[in-house]
Image (cartoon, grey):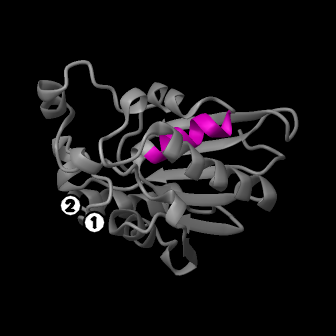
């Protein structure tokens, strides 16, 4: 079902070695796996016919390469605010490893030492939401899981911590939009594979 109002398509990047193993990948710039590249190419068919006024990407190569392999790279504008959560001291380690040293830890509640808290990521998401609302047009965004989850929460007016309620698979497509008018932001589709 399409909408008379602008829709924002969110694409999580394709698989990387670290997303496959569960390692937190914030600012480490690692490439897509072969499976990640294949999934990114398949996005071209899934997004075929999509008409947008702008394409925005995180600066990470996993996002920009997914964008390019999906046939939107030529139009992409890099937006630093779309970067993944800065995991600081937890970069490159798994949740299981973090919990062994810090029982009860939760990313969206506790954040990361030497990295970002949910409020920090939320502030970046708020800037993106303001740009999206100001544009008032359909936009395609390529980024990473935890950032996109916070973006969805902020789109709905929820606290950034509520991004924990959403899950995103690699190479998934989600759509933000509106229901009856521009004062009613909604999630129109989520985590489509």
State the residue lying farthest toward the front.
Answer: 114
State the residue lying farthest toward the right.
Answer: 181
Query: Residue at image x 29%, y 63%?
Result: 37
Task: Determine which of the numbered discs, if any, sits on residue 182 in the image.
Answer: none
Query: Which of labels 1 and 2 is toward the front?
Result: 1
Query: Residue at image x 43%, y 69%?
Result: 59
Task: Determine which of the numbered discs, if any, sits on residue 33 in the image.
Answer: 2
Q: Is residue 165 above or below residue 71?
A: above
Where is the C terminus found, in terms of image quarters?
top left
Which of 100 and 2 lies nearest the eye of the viewer? Answer: 100
Relative placement, left or right, of 28 versus 185 is: left
Query: Residue at image x 15%, y 29%?
Result: 96
Rate crowding at label 1 as few (under 14), some (14 to 19) or many (20 or more) other CA atoms within 10 Å. Answer: few
Q: Is residue 54 above or below residue 188?
A: below
Report helix, strand or loop for mark 1. Answer: loop
Magenta stretch in the rendered image: 147-156
Which of 108 and 32 lies nearest the eye of the viewer? Answer: 108
- Tell whether label 2 touches label 1 (CB within 8 Å): no
């Amino acid at each position: 079902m399409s909408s008379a109002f602008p829709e924002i398509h969110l694409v999580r990047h394709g698989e990387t070695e670290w997303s496959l193993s569960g390692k937190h990948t914030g600012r480490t710039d690692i490439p897509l796996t072969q499976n990640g590249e294949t999934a990114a190419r398949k996005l071209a068919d899934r997004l075929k016919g999509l008409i947008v006024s702008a394409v925005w990407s995180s600066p990470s190569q996993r996002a920009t390469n997914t964008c390019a392999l999906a046939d939107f790279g030529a139009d992409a504008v890099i937006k630093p605010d779309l970067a993944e959560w800065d995991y600081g001291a937890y970069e490159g380690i798994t949740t299981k490893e973090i919990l062994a040293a810090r029982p009860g830890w939760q990313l969206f509640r506790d954040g990361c030492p030497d990295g970002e808290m949910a409020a920090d990521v939320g502030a970046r998401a708020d800037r993106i939401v303001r740009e999206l609302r100001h544009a008032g047009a359909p936009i395609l965004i390529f980024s990473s899981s935890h950032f996109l989850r916070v973006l969805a929460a902020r789109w709905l007016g929820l606290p950034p911590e509520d991004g924990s309620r959403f899950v995103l698979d690699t190479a998934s497509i989600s759509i933000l939009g509106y229901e009856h008018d521009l004062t009613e932001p909604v999630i129109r589709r989520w985590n489509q594979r």
